[in-house]
């Protein structure tokens, strides 16, 4: 028996197609089946977006597993990601290499389009989901790439690896890999 599975409140509900089709007259069969297909097509993106994104949550930098650049030897860092359909909010807190506590929030738009970075005049970001566990972001200024970051969640969902490269405020290039544990 062929079935049509609908996502209802996060649960797949199989519906036998034969019983749906048999209960309708041959004349009404095609429009009814078309209606079901349209409803599934409209409901699927909403059901997928309601599933928890693996990036969402709080992550603590594991300094011993990370590869930090000598100019960026922060003492601690915590990242919190909130994911919605059109924006990823990343809030960070931590202590920099001078012992000063820093914090902030910025929004990432994973739609593949260029968006200005409000706290950095002249800079823009282009971000996209490169898979269900990987967010990729490129920062540019006047058309020139000045930074790249990727945030990848491990298959088991327990580790976040942030690969960050670019040019810092002093004009020096840097690359680092920050490994974070889910809190």
Image: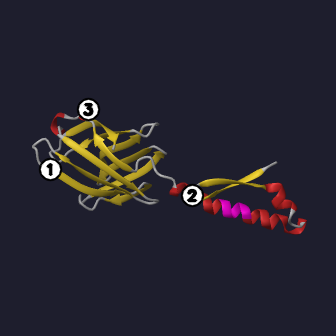
Question: Residue visible at 87% across and 60% down?
Answer: 22
Q: Residue furthest right?
A: 26
Q: Give neighbour class at mark 2: few <14, some 14-19, many 20+ (Cα, 10 Å).
A: some
Which callout, 3 or 1, points at the residue further toward the start of the chain? 3
Considering the numbered disc 1 on the image, is that residue within a helix, a strand or a loop?
strand
Q: Calculate the distance from the C-alpha at mark 3 to the C-alpha at mark 1.
A: 21 Å
Q: Is residue 37 magenta?
A: yes
Residue 83: where, in percent of width, then height?
A: 41, 55
Q: Calculate the distance from the C-alpha at mark 3 to the C-alpha at mark 2.
A: 38 Å
Disc 3 to disc 2: CB gap under 8 Å: no
Range covered by the magenta-colored residues: 36-40
Q: Give neighbour class at mark 3: few <14, some 14-19, many 20+ (Cα, 10 Å).
A: some
Residue 162 showing in the rendered view: no
Disc 1 to disc 2: CB gap under 8 Å: no
Color theme of the render: secondary structure
Residue 28 showing in the rendered view: yes
Considering the numbered disc 3 on the image, is that residue within a helix, a strand or a loop?
loop
The residue beneath circle 1 is 101
Quadrant of image for the C terminus:
top left
The residue beneath circle 3 is 67
Residue 170: where, in percent of width, then height?
A: 14, 45
The residue beneath circle 2 is 47
Left or right of residue 89: residue 45: right
Which callout, 3 or 2, points at the residue further toward the start of the chain? 2
Vertically, is 165 above or below 5? above
Mark closer to the observer (3, 1): 1
């Amino acid at each position: 028996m062929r079935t049509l599975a609908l996502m209802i409140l996060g649960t797949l509900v199989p519906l036998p197609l034969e019983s749906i089709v048999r209960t309708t007259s041959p004349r009404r069969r095609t429009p009814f089946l078309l209606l079901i297909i349209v409803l599934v097509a409209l409901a699927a993106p909403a059901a997928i977006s309601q599933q928890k994104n693996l990036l969402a949550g709080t992550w603590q930098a594991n300094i011993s597993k990370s590869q930090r650049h000598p100019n960026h030897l922060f003492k601690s860092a915590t990242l919190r990601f909130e994911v919605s359909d059109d924006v990823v909010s990343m809030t960070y807190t931590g202590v920099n290499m001078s012992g000063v506590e820093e914090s902030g929030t910025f929004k990432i738009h994973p739609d593949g389009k260029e968006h200005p970075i409000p706290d950095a005049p002249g800079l823009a970001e282009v971000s996209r989901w490169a898979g269900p566990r990987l967010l990729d972001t490129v920062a540019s200024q006047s058309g020139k790439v000045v930074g790249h970051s990727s945030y990848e969640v491990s298959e088991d969902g327990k580790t976040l690896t942030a690969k960050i490269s670019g040019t810092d405020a002093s004009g020096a290039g840097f690359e680092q890999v920050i490994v974070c544990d889910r809190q």
